[in-house]
Image: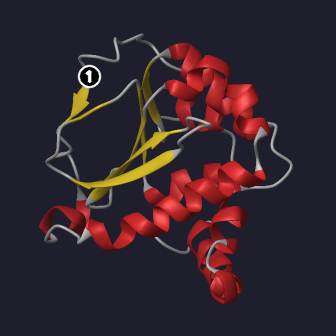
Amino acid sequence: MTSDNFSSDNRSINGNGANNLSRFLPPLPVFILQPLLNHIVKTVARRHPELFARLGDSCKKRYLIDPYNLPIFLLLQPDPDHPQLRIYNRGRNVPYDVFISGTFKTLLRMIDGQTDSDALFFNRQLKVTGNSEAVVALRNALDNMDATLAQDVASCFGPLSKPVRLLIDRIIKPGKTTL
């Protein structure tokens, strides 16, 4: 799924490549979203400790997730002792080990188990570079989950979990949105 094996010390993303409407939007107040992302990553980690076992040494890697049609990107560090999912506005340099990029809709469909990551990669809907071993470990860990991450994310919203799940379903439904 990847062609390069980069050193974790010298890779960073500037993030100026956003396209569509997002490049004209002002920076988001990411500090408002960060507590929610912290809650989501800790909830998923608590519910799925098997993910860390499947990741092995790759749980110490930094996965940059770039929904390139949004004005933000995410950095996932699935460390079992201190899992993190950080949000950044474009224009920041952030070191990473693995770079995963696609539209928001494509990435959401992938974590919901709606599509095959290999097919997305070979159809050029998903760009993946960086540490090959970490990429494969993450893909295998996600493929072997009984539940979907999208459902876990929705459940983090408590009484709003059903409307959030409906929103996710609306976004990932083929042909309905360009996100």
Seen in the image, is 20 located left or right of residue 102? left
Secondary structure beneath label 1:
loop
Residue 132 against residue 53 in the figure, above or below: above
Please name the residue shown 57% across and 54% down the image: 41
Furthest-right residue in this view: 146
| Image position, residue 44 (x, y; %) | 67, 54
Seen in the image, is 136 located left or right of residue 106? right
| Image position, residue 51 (x, y; %) | 72, 37
Seen in the image, is 146 located left or right of residue 116? right
Furthest-front residue in this view: 81
In this rendered view, identify the residue nearer to me: 179 or 159.
Answer: 159
Report whether residue 27 is seen: yes
Amino acid carrying mark 1 in the image: Arg
Quarter of the view holding residue 75: top left
Q: Mark 1 points at which residue?
A: 11
Quarter of the image where the C terminus is located? bottom left
Residue 159 against residue 90 in the figure, above or below: below
Please name the residue shown 53% across and 42% down the image: 82
In this rendered view, identify the residue nearer to me: 129 or 58.
Answer: 58
In this rendered view, identify the residue nearer to me: 155 or 20.
Answer: 155
Quarter of the image where the N terminus is located? top right
| Image position, residue 62 (x, y; %) | 43, 31
| Image position, residue 39 (x, y; %) | 55, 64
Report whether residue 114 is seen: no
How crowded pointer 1 is (Cα within 10 Å; few <14, some 14-19, many 20+) is rated as some
In this rendered view, identify the residue nearer to me: 57 or 103.
Answer: 57
